[in-house]
Image (spheres, coloured by chain):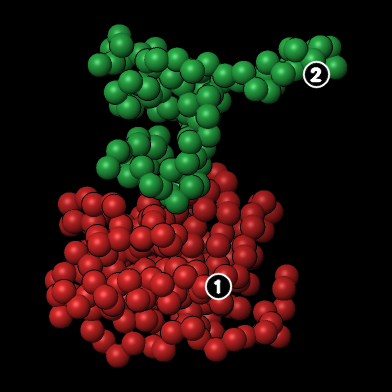
């Protein structure tokens, strides 16, 4: 596969946040895994969950975004080991594993009004009943395609790097209502 | 906002979807056997009915799947949605309001 350690790296598009309602997260390693007809664990990720759920911890999880699609997120620097583990566990199967760590930016939205802030741009019901802990989905925030994950405290918004200033600005502006 | 029932994700907001036009239009098995009029019929002619209509929809900002749905073009209400490749289901209620 691609020799990612030699790939060009640009500086992070957003500075890491220092807390608050909207706070950009540090860089992370991410993979998009496409795999049909599989249920179980691979590479330390629990892939057995239903569609639109996430399993794992806030910094390391597998979010099932489609019937055969997962977004795997893990702390920066652990990607190479996870890739090798996944390839070992899935040997003999047809699958696609693409490193997208540099493509995405993660933004944490926390606090008692986190769902209200997100709902300024997301038409989906993000209440505890409709979007409980362990939920994850792809949706639209304003005009940007984002992935929303609810694991641990608050929400994690994953968007493409080029959308990050828009998404961050959008959420920061809304958060002023609740600051 | 209109809620579109995705057979994989459940009811979701309309902005996540893209409509792909009429469903159940099969490509002719042997295009060479058709004359121009028949080929044009396959390419361009669509029913534009008033009432229940079978359409293809893409959940582009969601699970990324194509599916078929029955929609009433008068009331804009969705009556059923089903996965690609399945036959058009019988209507839950005649006319569907």
Task: Answer with the quarter of the image where residue A95 lies.
Answer: bottom right
Query: Visible in this render: residue A104?
Result: no
Given residues A79 and B44, the one toward you in this image is B44
Q: Colour of chain B?
A: green
Left or right placement of residue A82 versus residue A75 in this view: right
Quadrant of the image containing the C terminus of chain B = top left
Identity of the residue drawn at 72% across and 73% down: A2
In the rendered view, tell whether residue A63 sits above or below residue B27.
Answer: below
What residue do we see at 72% from left, 78% from top? Answer: A3
Q: Nearer the viewer, residue B90 or A132?
A: B90
Tell me residue A33's x, y (percent): 56, 59
Per the model, the C-alpha gap separating discs 2 and 1 is 43 Å
A104 over A42 or under it: above or below: below
Identify the residue shown where x is 30% and y is 90%.
A18
Q: Which chain is red?
A: A
Q: Secondary structure at mark 1?
A: loop
Percent of width and height locating residue B9: 37, 42
* Residue A69 vertical placement versus A85 (above, below): above
* Residue assigned mark 1: A103
Disc tally is 2
What kind of element bears circle 2? helix
Query: What chain is tagged by disc 2?
Result: B
Q: Residues within 10 Å of mark 2 (few under 14, many from 20)?
A: few
Which of the 4 image quadrants contains residue A178? bottom left
Q: Which residue is mark 2?
A: B31
């Amino acid at each position: 596969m691609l020799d990612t350690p030699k790939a060009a790296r640009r500086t992070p598009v957003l500075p890491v946040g220092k807390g608050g309602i909207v706070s950009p997260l540090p860089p992370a390693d991410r993979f998009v895994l496409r795999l049909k007809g599989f249920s179980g664990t691979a590479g330390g990720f629990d892939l057995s969950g239903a569609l639109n759920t996430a399993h794992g911890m806030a910094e390391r999880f597998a979010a099932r975004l489609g019937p055969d699609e997962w977004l795997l997120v893990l702390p920066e620097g652990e990607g190479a080991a996870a890739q090798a583990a996944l390839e070992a566990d899935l040997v003999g199967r047809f699958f696609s594993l693409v490193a997208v760590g540099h493509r995405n930016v993660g933004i944490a939205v926390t606090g008692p009004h986190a769902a209200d802030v997100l709902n300024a741009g997301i038409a989906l019901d993000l209440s505890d009943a409709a979007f409980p802990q362990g939920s994850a989905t792809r949706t639209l925030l304003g005009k940007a395609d984002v992935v929303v994950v609810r694991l641990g405290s608050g929400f994690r918004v994953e968007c493409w790097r080029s959308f990050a200033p828009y998404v961050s600005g959008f959420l920061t502006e809304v958060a002023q209502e609740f600051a | 906002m209109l809620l579109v029932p995705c057979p994989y994700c459940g009811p979701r907001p309309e902005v996540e979807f893209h409509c792909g036009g009429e469903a159940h239009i099969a490509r002719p098995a042997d295009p060479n056997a058709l004359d121009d009029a028949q080929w044009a019929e396959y390419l361009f002619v669509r029913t534009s009915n008033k009432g229940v209509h079978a359409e293809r929809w893409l959940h582009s900002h969601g699970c990324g799947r194509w599916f078929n749905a029955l929609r009433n073009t008068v009331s804009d209400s969705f009556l059923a949605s089903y996965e690609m490749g399945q036959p058009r289901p019988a209507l839950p209620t005649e006319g569907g309001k």
